[in-house]
Amino acid sequence: METLYHQTNKQIQEVQSQMGRLETTDRQSVHLLENELQARIDQIFNQLERLEILASKEPPNRRQNAKLRVDQLKYDVQHLQTALGNFQHRRYAREAQEREREELLSRSFTTNDADTSIPIDETLQFNSGLQNAHRGMDDLLGSGSSILNGLRDQRSTLKGTHKKMLDVANMLGLSNTVMRFIEKRASQDKFIMMAGMLATCFVMFLVVKYLS
């Protein structure tokens, strides 16, 4: 487990250092870097699943500490996933704004012989439509990110529930052993009590007989 733990921690640190390159990478290559980082984050999540299984198999005196270490790694990689999602969201929004600007600047306006006029109303409607589309894209990306985080949280919750069920099963096994010991001791105490009662009755009989 120690080897896999240190390997995963090293990979998280490498992804953290590469995250700083997102802001300086050119537009043609940034999506390739995003895909690479996402693939490495997914790989780390898979390794964390193995670490959780290994941590649950640790001796009782080291199990809690092992689980805490794995939870810290999980928190770090979830933070990286959120940071990558936020960067992608900002990039999509920035690119959408640039496309809107280019479309407005390249739009040709109509003229007529009687007078020269610009169809302001139509341009405003077009701009309003682009803004609505931009907001819709933001909402869609935000919903997708929320769904992804929700799925990851559900997966973590299910794993935690599974581990708790295993712990309860282990506790029940221990409890059954203790209950059998208690039942055996109760039977012994019952025989001792009955023997004591018989001895007391015998002594009382002797006392009454000789004193009377």
Image (tube, rainbow, N blue to C red):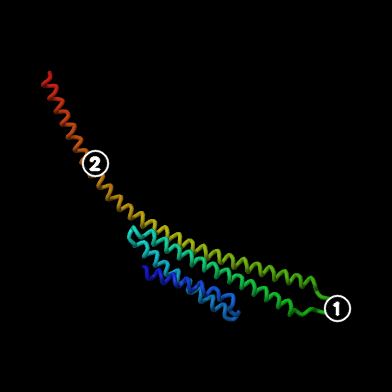
Q: Position of residue 115 (x, y in %)?
A: 88, 78
Between 93 and 103, the one lying in front of the other is 93
> Could you tell me which residue is drawn at 24 percent across and 41 percent down?
186
Residue labelled with disc 1: 116
Q: Which quarter of the image is occupied by the C terminus?
A: top left
Mark positioned earlier in the residue sequence (2 or 1): 1
Amino acid, disc 2? Ala
Looking at the image, which residue sits at the far left? 210
Which corner quadrant of the image does residue 144 belong to?
Answer: bottom right
> Could you tell me which residue is drawn at 16 percent across and 28 percent down?
201
Element assignment for label 2? helix
Up the image or down, 106 lies above or below 160; here it is below
Q: Which quarter of the image is occupied by the N terminus?
A: bottom left
Residue labelled with disc 2: 186
What whole-number distance in Å separates the C-alpha atoms at marks 2 and 1?
107 Å
Comparing labels 2 and 1, the label whose residue is closer to the camera: 2
> Could you tell me which residue is drawn at 55 percent across and 64 percent down?
146
Q: Position of residue 5 (x, y in %)?
A: 40, 68
Amino acid, disc 1? Thr
